[in-house]
Image: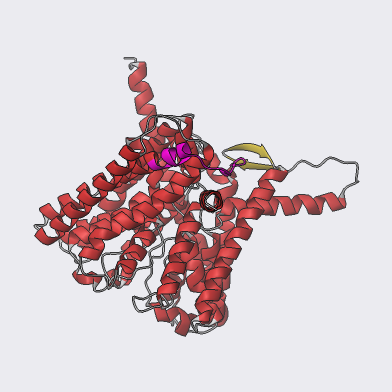
Amino acid sequence: MMANPTIRHFLRSIFNGVMGICLEVLMTVLFIFAAFAVCILWWGIFT
Amino acid sequence: MVGYIHVILKPTTEDYKIIGYYLGKITIGLGLLMLIPLAIAFIYGEIAPAIDFLLSMGATLLAGTLLSGLFHTKKDMGTSHAMCVAALSWIAAMFVSAIPLYLSGHYSCFLDACFETMSGYATTGLTLTSDVDHMANSYNFWRHLTMFVGGQGIVVIALTFLFKGSAGAFRMYVGEARDERILPNVIETARFIWLVSLVYLVLGSAALTIAGICGGLKPAKAAFDAVCLFMAAFDTGGFTPQSQNILFYHNFPFELITTSLMMLGAINFALHYVLWTGNRREIYRNIEIITLFMSILVTLSITAWGVASRLVYPDAVPFFRRVFYQLFSGHTGTGYTTLYARQFVNEWGQLGMFGLTLAMAVGGSMCSTTGAIKVLRLGILYKALRQDIKKLLIPESAVLVQKLHHIKDMILEDRHVRMAALILLSYAALYLFGAIITMFYGYSLSEAAFESVSAAANVGLSCGVTSPSMPAVLKVVYMFQMWAGRLEFIAILTLGGLVIATLKGKR
């Protein structure tokens, strides 16, 4: 059954929003991993 | 980007009426905002704070009604009026919001309460509260609410609830250092900013509540702290309901969640919009994100080098948790900390403090809740430098076009570079001004620079200079820095022009 275009548009908006949030959180996680690598590097050099 | 603004050279009665009328409307909005802590006071059965909020709300509504009634006009704002209203509304917000805090008895004088509210609205996080651990929940909530409101922008709130769409509304929005219109209509832009914030309010508060309960807090306390911490983290503020800041919780999940919230708050709302509407490639093409990433890694390297060389932390994980958290908090302009203030001076050393000061001076994205120079401007200046170097290497007759990608592809123009350089220089001057005054009171260069940059870049990390006993002049200087740093000078310069024009006219 074809969904109503309004409902389809609404569902697509929700999907895009959720994906956007996931992407933003994923970016933060990548930032943290990159930072962890930098910190380990400096800590390793001095100990 | 902001165009040229004409300062009112010969102000007329109509000019004052327009400014007074719209300022009055915003003041009424601020009065109505006190309904929220009033409700909190009733929920927690806090009678004395409820009376304080009722009195403050009455005084604020009366002042707002008088202003808008006395200066009633139907004319829309010009650019310079809007700038003056934006600048003055922050001063008005500081004064009226300080009334309940002063009445709470947690501040030794009204100046301290004003410092607290300016720090809140500017999303700085420097605090002069005495005995915050025993503060009533409604006062504490009010402190955090000022951060949420200031991070969103006082004008954004006014646009959402009080004004109909008009050219003047957009000019006022620009005056609050938000020169990107995400959607064609400025009111819709303001509402989108609210949508993002409210979605993350629900998600962030829920995550912090769960982390708090797992960490041993009672559910009610965990939920209250979670909402307060969310407001201060997402709006890159830095207040906490405890005097020991995030250190109080000793909770690694708390640190991870607040790190995510700080990051989300430091992202441009325009980027949130494109990501939330399906343009996912923007995340690795956007010049702001790339510059932010590079800037964090560079400043983190400097700080980590400085701290690691002093061998303060015996293991890698505590080293990472301490250094990264403070650095990230400083770079995003939040000011959350898991250290005591004097540890920066006693344990981190000159290089560690320098790296952190540099990170604080840079800040987050444009059109976000952060302050400071902002990474987009650094990205623009870097592109301009690269273009100039390339020009030296190619034949003189060749035409070189420098592109940059921020939401859409753009060609780098001289006006972009000039604007970025001007704002960078203005911030440098503001940082220097605060540092000189702080040094005058006997602090070392590194301490003075740290505290001055923290205030002007709306960060809120402190190395121990900010305290209720510090000289009143320093308090006023930091308040000015927070105000000027948050509004990014243009609105304040326009207001300064109006004041000078008014004084000249009276001679």
Q: Is residue B302 left or right of residue B256?
A: right
Name which quarter of the figure residue A21 lies in.
top left
Image coordinates for residue B177, horizontal then vertical, percent? 50, 47
For residue B466, above or below residue B502: below
Q: Position of residue B22 (x, y in %)?
A: 39, 39
Residue in view at x 31 percent, y 51 percent = B204
Q: Position of residue B394 (x, y in %)?
A: 87, 48
Q: Is residue A41 magenta?
A: no
Residue B51 location in percent, x, y? 13, 56
Q: Which residues are magenta?
A: B1-20
How are the residues colored? secondary structure
Q: Is residue B382 visible?
A: yes
Residue at position x 48%, y 81% in the image: B441
Q: In the displayed image of the protein, which residue is found farthest to the front?
A: B507
Frontmost residue, B215 versus A41? B215
Quadrant for residue B100, please give it: bottom left
Residue at 49% x, 29% y is B184
Vertical side of A19 occupied by B384: above or below: below
* Corner quadrant of residue A42: bottom right
Question: Could you tell me if residue B211 is visible in this image?
Answer: no
Q: Is residue B119 above or below residue B502?
A: below
In this picture, is A10 found above or below B85?
above
